[in-house]
Image: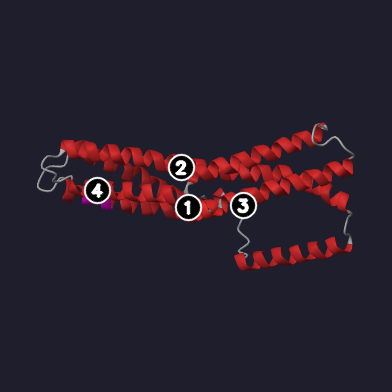
């Protein structure tokens, strides 16, 4: 976030200034630009300029920081991670636990898998909501600009942009299907959590010995994960391909 703010804020400042000139030359060509529009662009530029100035001061002043980046490259960090993973695998091979212990360890890792599925579900749900809101505002903007500007100049450029936005969002929603992905991920997470609670409480179907319960639990969770991957593959297929897979 620090790097994003450091480089993104000046870019937004330049984009806002360019938008200011573009609005004056395209939307109000040959006319006086309203003072409210000038004031809005100026206020946004002032805020972005102040934020950029403050961030550069903070970034390059040692007084604000009691730590310093080690300067280690990403490639070096990735190599250290791969070496640590190799050492872990070798140690695991040397001390290979029994099947029951591995199943118990698998059960302890299941809540993290549930959280991962829910996190991805929330991500796709937010993507779907943003697409839908942008689609709503773009559709409403087309109607509003068409009714406001008659003849269509100088709103023709805005109409073209909004129409392009609607087309892109509609195609993206139909292709990526974020709502369906969010629903499938949330459903799988809820089902796995139900089995976790069932084995913790010792209720059906986990009413046997501990070893048998762990084996059944691992089997059920793996089956649900396989079904989740199949649903994701079906969403990636064209409509005709989905029917053939089903």
Q: Residue at x 82, y 65 (%)?
A: 90
Q: Which residue is mark 4?
A: 20
> Looking at this view, is 111 or 240 the one in front?
240
Q: Residue at x 46, y 50 (%)?
A: 55
Span of residues in magenta: 18-22
Membership of 5 in magenta stretch: no
Between discs 4 and 1, the one toward the N terminus: 1
> How far is the residue under mark 4 from the one under mark 1?
23 Å
> Looking at this view, is 63 or 164 the one in front?
164
Q: Residue at x 70, y 37 (%)?
A: 193
Q: Judge left or right: residue 125 versus residue 154.
A: right
> How far is the residue under mark 3 from the one under mark 1?
33 Å
Q: Which label number is shown at residue 128?
A: 2
Label 3 vs label 2, nearer the camera: 3
Between discs 3 and 1, the one toward the N terminus: 1
Q: Which residue is mark 3?
A: 229
Between discs 1 and 2, the one toward the N terminus: 1
Membership of 19 in magenta stretch: yes
Q: Which label number is shown at residue 226?
A: none
């Amino acid at each position: 976030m620090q790097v994003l703010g450091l480089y993104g804020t000046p870019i937004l400042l330049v984009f806002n200034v360019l938008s200011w000139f573009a609005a004056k030359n395209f939307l109000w060509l040959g006319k006086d630009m309203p003072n409210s529009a000038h004031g809005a662009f100026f206020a946004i530029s002032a805020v972005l300029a102040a934020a950029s100035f403050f961030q550069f001061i903070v970034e390059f002043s040692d007084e604000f920081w009691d730590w310093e980046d080690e300067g280690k490259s990403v490639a070096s960090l990735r190599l250290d991670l791969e070496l640590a993973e190799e050492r872990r695998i070798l140690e695991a091979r040397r001390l290979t636990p029994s099947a029951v212990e591995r199943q118990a360890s698998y059960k302890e890792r299941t809540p993290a898998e549930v959280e991962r599925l829910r996190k991805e579900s929330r991500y796709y749900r937010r993507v779907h909501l943003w697409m839908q809101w942008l689609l709503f505002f773009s559709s409403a903007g087309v109607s509003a600009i068409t009714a406001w500007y008659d003849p269509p100049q100088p709103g023709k450029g805005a109409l073209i942009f909004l129409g392009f936005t609607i087309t892109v969002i509609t195609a993206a929603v139909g292709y990526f299907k974020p709502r369906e992905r969010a629903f499938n991920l949330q459903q799988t997470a809820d089902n796995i959590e139900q089995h976790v609670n069932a084995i913790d409480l010792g209720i059906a179907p986990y009413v046997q010995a501990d070893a048998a319960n762990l084996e059944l639990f691992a089997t059920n969770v793996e089956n649900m994960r396989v079904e989740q991957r199949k649903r994701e593959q079906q969403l990636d297929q064209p409509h005709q391909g989905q029917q053939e897979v089903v």
